[in-house]
Amino acid sequence: MVSGILSSLGHGQLGMRLSIGLHTDPGPREGQNQDSILGLLFNGPPSSALLIVADGMGGAKAGEQASQEAIAVLRHHLAEGQFPTPANATERLLEAITAANT
């Protein structure tokens, strides 16, 4: 099981505070949970988050290692340097996914 809590996103237009929790579940099969998870909070208005789960493929050989590597590559492409903006988030995410699969 992978879990965690990200810091609150702050107060929105309605004065609400949003907190995000992260959790994966191994499902009904016995064995180790091979999932990995990434949560990124973006600063500035509007506050937003990007949540990604890399599925370890339910017991496939080296599934845990593969999901961890995918998350590491996605983190590198999305969190290091300038965070994606609403205008370029789709393009940046596609680039990161492509890099993770090469």
Image (spheres, rainbow, N blue to C red):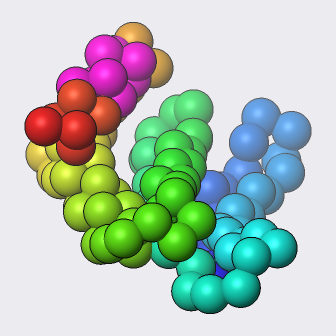
Q: Residue at x 34, y 29 (%)?
A: 93
Q: Is residue 23 left or right of residue 13?
A: left
Q: Position of residue 63 (x, y in %)?
A: 39, 67
Magenta-span inclusion, residue 95: yes
Q: Is residue 69 left or right of residue 4?
A: left
Which image quadrant is residue 12 in? top right
Q: Is residue 99 left or right of residue 8?
A: left
**What is the tally of numbered marks visible in this picture?**
0
* The one of 72 and 39 positioned closer to us in this rendering: 72
Q: Residue at x 58, y 79 (%)?
A: 33
Q: Is residue 26 above or below residue 18?
A: below
Task: Give the magenta part as a residue range.
Answer: 88-96
Q: Is residue 57 above or below residue 6?
A: above
Q: Position of residue 7 (x, y in %)?
A: 58, 71
Q: Position of residue 80 (x, y in %)?
A: 16, 52
The quadrant of the picture occupied by the C terminus is top left
Main SS of the magenta segment?
Answer: helix
Residue 79 seen from this side: no
Residue 8 seen from this side: yes
Q: Is residue 75 above or below residue 91?
A: below
Q: Residue at x 46, y 40 (%)?
A: 44
The quadrant of the picture occupied by the N terminus is bottom right
Q: Residue at x 22, y 43 (%)?
A: 100
Q: Position of residue 19 (x, y in %)?
A: 73, 64
Magenta-span inclusion, residue 33: no
